[in-house]
Image (cartoon, rainbow, N blue to C red):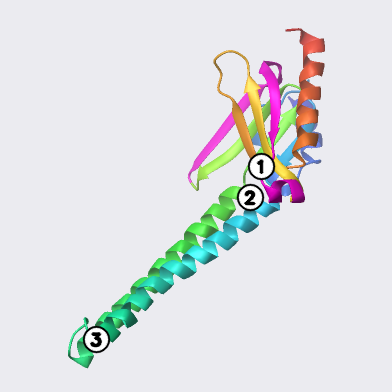
Amino acid sequence: MTHISEHRTEAAAKLSSVGKRYFNFIEFDDEEELVLEIRKHPFGLLILIVGGLVISFVVALIPMMLAFVLDDAGVVGESGQSMALVQQLLVIAGLILGLGALVVTGINTILYRNNVIFVTNEKIAQVMYLSIFNRKISQLSIGDIQDVTVAQNGVFPNLIGYGSLIVETAGEQQNYTFTYVPKPYESARVIVGSHELNLRKYGN
């Protein structure tokens, strides 16, 4: 047991801070070797943050614009007091909606950063947070892999160097798709190489 613990500790030393945090969630015995850690590309995080900020701005702005439109159209009411009240409520609603969108963006950012994939000579394991309180751990035997496909669609994936990995499995098992993978062709080569070494060791 001590030997396994030391072996895990040595493997974890090569990981990022996020990888070290979640490495204990996967099975890892003294016969395994850690081959690769995959974290999502920072560009996906940038898209998430910029998109969240734009959405926050828009949802905050719409109620405020509505208040001024109603005021200009004379729909709010004849008394200045009622107009001011409705305008204030719309402004407050816009601020609340904008703040809520910012909170959602912050949560999605945390979930994105806490997605990690471990490749060993025995398996592919993914730790993924679907929500703050909903964690999913998927493990696939490296010997069950049939093919690994790289998809880079669009200008940014090819220009910046990220893409999707589609891991096709044998039998009726579901295929695995990993998005925003940095240097996807290199990762694919590592996975395929580990698969071939596994086949030479254990056979089909």
Q: Which residue is identified by label 1? A: 153
Which numbered mark, 3 or 1, is in the foreground of this view?
Answer: 1
Residue at the image point whose x is 24% and y is 86% from the top: 83
Residue found at the very far top of the displayed protein: 203
Q: CA distance from mark 3 to mark 1?
A: 51 Å
Residue at the image point whose x is 65% and y is 30% from the top: 166
Residue 20 appears in the figure: no
Of residues 82 and 125, the one drawn nearer to the viewer in this rendering: 82
Which numbered mark, 2 or 1, is in the foreground of this view?
Answer: 1
Q: Earlier in the sequence, mark 2 or mark 1?
A: 2
State the image coordinates of residue 17 (x, y, percent, origin top left): 72, 48
On screen, residue 188 above or below 56 = above
State the image coordinates of residue 103 (x, y, percent, origin top left): 48, 61
> What span is in magenta?
133-159
Mark 1 residue type: Asn
Residue 127 appears in the figure: yes
Q: Which residue is identified by label 2? A: 113
Residue at the image point whose x is 80% and y is 17% from the top: 196
Residue 89: image quadrant is: bottom left
On screen, residue 67 above or below 11 = below
Of residues 198 and 25, the one drawn nearer to the viewer in this rendering: 198
Q: Earlier in the sequence, mark 3 or mark 2?
A: 3
Q: CA distance from mark 2 to mark 1?
A: 22 Å
Q: Which residue is identified by label 3? A: 83
Q: CA distance from mark 3 to mark 2?
A: 45 Å
Q: Is residue 142 on the magenta stretch?
A: yes
